[in-house]
Image (tube, rainbow, N blue to C red):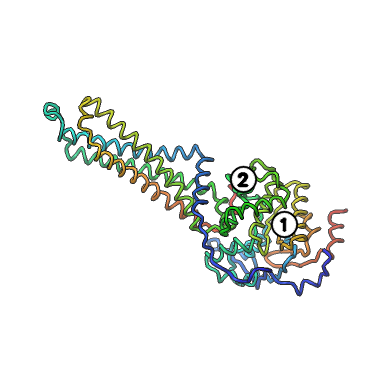
């Protein structure tokens, strides 16, 4: 043997490779990727619609013409609590959907993960691969959802109050809420992927190779 | 091929197992898959591990490949005791010291032949250009020089297994482990893969350990280790075996 008989620690964690592989996996399994993204789109668009509508209403109350302000009904605490409950519920559902989809992705790629481990992939690499995938889906879904929710809240406000909405449009608060909504979507996606990723990373390579899927 | 059968004694030992036992616990039942296996495999040898299903063949294979740990006893690869290694060191060892070939090829379906071959090099920290050059060279060596950009599903079974062979050689491992490498291939393709493995052993001094029950394998193996009931039943050299095979297969 030409190699010296020493053992080193595997340190290479090529992040770019992890990203590349997770992107390809999303492309190859495009249908399921769409479903996962769809789940987060629904959750985040609802969130954005609710906060967007509220921001517009508040802006109207503050700066709108008096004759309109008099006709506006300020939502009571109970209605607000109900909305918060609905939004939380929709986000939870989106999170569970992502978790489920990622678990499926892990099971489906059981052998692939085992093979990579045989080739020298660290648990860390597997973690990166799956978290990346989920984070990316969450990002795309949140951006789309945020946009849809914003447009919906604007359209509803236009229908309800007329063009006056544009004169008082609270651009700053809407934007910061949009950023928060995207961040929320991203966080939910990553949190939902933690358990499936853990399952994948802890897999014993021998088990992975024996599995018949 | 022309080695004196006794010359193995002064060659380096690549794999050594010392009274390896493996017990699986399933609820209240325990199953002794391996009941004490002592084995020495030398550098540059072509070894076949033969035995019926359930004989402990796969378990032994997994032990030697660092895929599973023995309940008792020790496994050394290149004189390193696998039990002493942590996860990072084990990953390092799997990456550089062992090449794996599987019955089901286990190529990554979303990657091209070349990318499959270079993946272990990426894990080993090789630069992109260097990895690509070496990958192209290895694919050429297994006779797939003109198919490096094909995806696994665009290749036949035999071609996929060739890619897997090239991948196993990626980091010039001390030993190549093949688990039923011909199990999913037809007679001709299987023979081709066996010949390929044999030529790698002869031309490049690669050590090959193959778990199999493909009798075609006997022809090319330096030694055949017969496993029965969790123990080594007997170890035969090919020279002593030729007659027996003749009787067995009738040619």
Pointer 2 residue: B112
User: Secondary structure under badge 2?
Assistant: loop
Residue at far front of view:
B129
Q: Residue, x 47% and y 50% (percent of image)?
A: A130
Q: Left of A66 or right of it: where is A124?
A: right
Image x and y of residue A131, in percent? 44, 50
Would residue A65 be found to the left or right of residue A119 on screen? left
Residue A210 in sight:
no
Measured in 3D between alpha carbons, the distance from the residue under mark 1 to the one under mark 2, in whole angstroms, is: 28 Å
Viewer-nearest residue: A53 or B114: B114
Q: Is residue A38 above or below residue A118?
A: above
Residue A74 at least partly seen: yes
Q: Chain of mark 2?
A: B
Which quarter of the rendered picture does the N terminus of chain B lie within?
bottom right
Q: Is residue A96 left or right of residue B227?
A: left
Q: Quadrant of residue B199?
A: bottom right
Would you place residue A36 above or below residue A210 in this image? above
Residue B173: x and y in percent read 66, 62
Query: At which x and y percent is residue A185?
Result: 36, 44
Write down the chain letter for disc 1.
B
Residue to which mark 1 is pinned: B212
Residue A67 picture quarter: top left
Q: Is residue A25 above or below residue A59?
A: below
Instruction: Determine whether the residue tagged by mark 1 lies in a helix, strand or loop.
Output: strand
């Amino acid at each position: 043997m030409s190699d010296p008989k020493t053992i080193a620690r595997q340190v290479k964690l090529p992040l770019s490779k992890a990203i590349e592989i997770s992107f390809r996996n999303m492309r190859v399994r495009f249908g399921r990727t769409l479903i996962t993204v769809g789940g987060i789109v629904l959750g985040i668009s609802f969130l954005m619609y609710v906060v967007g509508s509220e921001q517009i209403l508040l802006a109207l109350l503050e700066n709108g013409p008096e004759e309109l302000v008099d006709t506006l009904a300020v939502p009571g605490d109970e209605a607000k609590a109900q909305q918060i409950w609905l939004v939380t519920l929709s986000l939870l559902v989106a999170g569970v959907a992502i978790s489920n989809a990622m678990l499926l992705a892990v099971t489906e790629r059981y052998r692939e993960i085992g093979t990579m481990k045989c080739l020298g992939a660290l648990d860390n690499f597997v973690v990166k691969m799956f978290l990346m995938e989920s984070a990316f889906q969450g990002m795309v879904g949140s951006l789309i959802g945020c946009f849809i929710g914003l447009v919906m809240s604007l359209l509803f406000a236009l229908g309800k109050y007329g063009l006056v909405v544009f004169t008082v449009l609270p651009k700053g608060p809407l934007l910061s809420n949009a950023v928060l909504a995207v961040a929320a979507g991203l966080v939910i996606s990553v949190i939902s992927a933690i358990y499936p990723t853990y399952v994948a990373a802890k897999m014993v390579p021998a088990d992975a190779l024996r599995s018949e899927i | 091929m022309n080695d004196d059968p006794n010359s193995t004694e002064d060659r380096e030992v690549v794999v050594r197992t010392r009274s390896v036992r493996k017990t699986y616990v399933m609820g209240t039942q325990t199953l002794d898959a391996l009941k004490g296996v002592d084995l020495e495999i030398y550098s540059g040898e072509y070894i076949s591990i033969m035995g019926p299903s359930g004989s402990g063949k796969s378990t032994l294979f997994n032990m030697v490949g660092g895929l599973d740990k023995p309940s008792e006893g020790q496994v050394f690869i290149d004189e390193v005791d696998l039990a002493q290694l942590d996860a990072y060191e084990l990953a390092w060892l799997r990456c550089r010291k062992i090449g794996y070939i599987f019955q089901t090829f286990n190529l990554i379906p979303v990657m091209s032949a070349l990318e499959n071959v270079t993946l272990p090099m990426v894990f080993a920290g090789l630069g992109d250009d260097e990895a690509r050059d070496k990958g192209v060279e290895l694919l050429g060596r297994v006779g797939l020089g003109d198919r490096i950009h094909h995806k696994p599903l665009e290749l036949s079974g035999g071609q996929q297994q060739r890619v897997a062979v090239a991948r196993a050689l990626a980091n010039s491992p001390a030993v190549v482990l093949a688990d039923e490498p011909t199990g999913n291939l037809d007679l001709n393709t299987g023979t081709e893969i066996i010949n390929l493995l044999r030529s790698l052993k002869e031309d490049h001094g690669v050590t090959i350990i193959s778990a199999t029950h493909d009798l075609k394998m006997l022809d090319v193996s330096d030694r055949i280790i017969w496993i029965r009931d969790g123990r080594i039943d007997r170890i035969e050299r090919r020279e002593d075996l030729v007659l027996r095979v003749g009787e067995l297969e009738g040619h």
